[in-house]
Amino acid sequence: MRYLVMVQGSQADYDAMNGRASAHSPAWSEEDLRAMFAFMGKIGEDLAASGELIDANGLAEPARTLWVSSGPDGVPVITDDPYGETTPLPAGYWVLDCATQERVTEIAARITHCPGPEGLTGHPVVIRPILDSGAEAAGGRGTG
């Protein structure tokens, strides 16, 4: 079954990765960033080698998020940066093809051990099954 596995991050987290600490996140050093990128790179390499990796990417900071909704007159309303500084949003993702839920959970647990600066409080890793058929999309039971 395919899964979307997401790491979360707030604008305060992205700011901290750029050296600007806040009450919500300690500042990251160059060494912290190198360790994090090496850790994430190794996970990607391992998932590619196992054949489970379909796609993976990091996402731009929440301040660059756009929210598009339908206004009362039906005209689209576009709001930039609609989230507060501390609201966690997806910061990166993997699309994985795993044989079991236990396997994808094992991968997510590994991701939670990503290194960071002293005092860093991590966000949970989110796992969402990707619906593969109309029956699953309609609420039916899927396989996997």
Image (tube, rainbow, N blue to C red):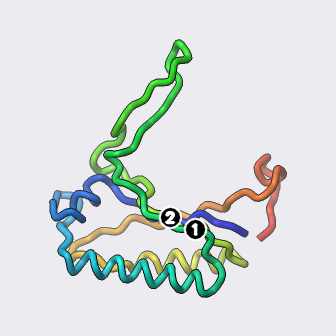
Name the quarter where the N terminus is drawn: bottom right
Q: Which mark is residue 55?
A: 1
* Residue position for label 2: 93
Q: Is residue 38 left or right of residue 71?
A: left
Eye-nearest disc, 1 or 2: 1
Q: Which mark is residue 137?
A: none
Q: Is residue 142 left or right of residue 52?
A: right
Image location of residue 94, percent across then percent down: 54, 68
Image location of residue 92, percent across then percent down: 45, 63
Using the image, determine if residue 8 lies above or below residue 86: below
Front residue of 126/46: it is 46
For marks 1 and 2 on the same chain, the one whose residue lies earlier in the sequence? 1
Mark 2: give few (<14), some (14-19) or many (20+) Cα within 10 Å.
some
Q: Secondary structure at mark 2?
A: strand
Determine whether label 1 and label 2 are within 8 Å by CB: yes
Q: Is residue 92 left or right of residue 49?
A: left
Q: Is residue 97 left or right of residue 141?
A: left
Residue at point 33% right, 77% down? 36
Using the image, determine if residue 58 lies above or below residue 38: above
On the image, which quarter does residue 27 sit in? bottom left
Name the quarter where the C terminus is drawn: bottom right
Image location of residue 136, percent across then percent down: 79, 54
Residue at point 58% right, 68% down? 55
Q: Amino acid at mark 2?
A: Tyr
Q: Secondary structure at mark 1?
A: strand
Q: How many numbered discs?
A: 2
Using the image, determine if residue 7 lies above or below residue 76: below
Residue at point 48% right, 32% down? 68
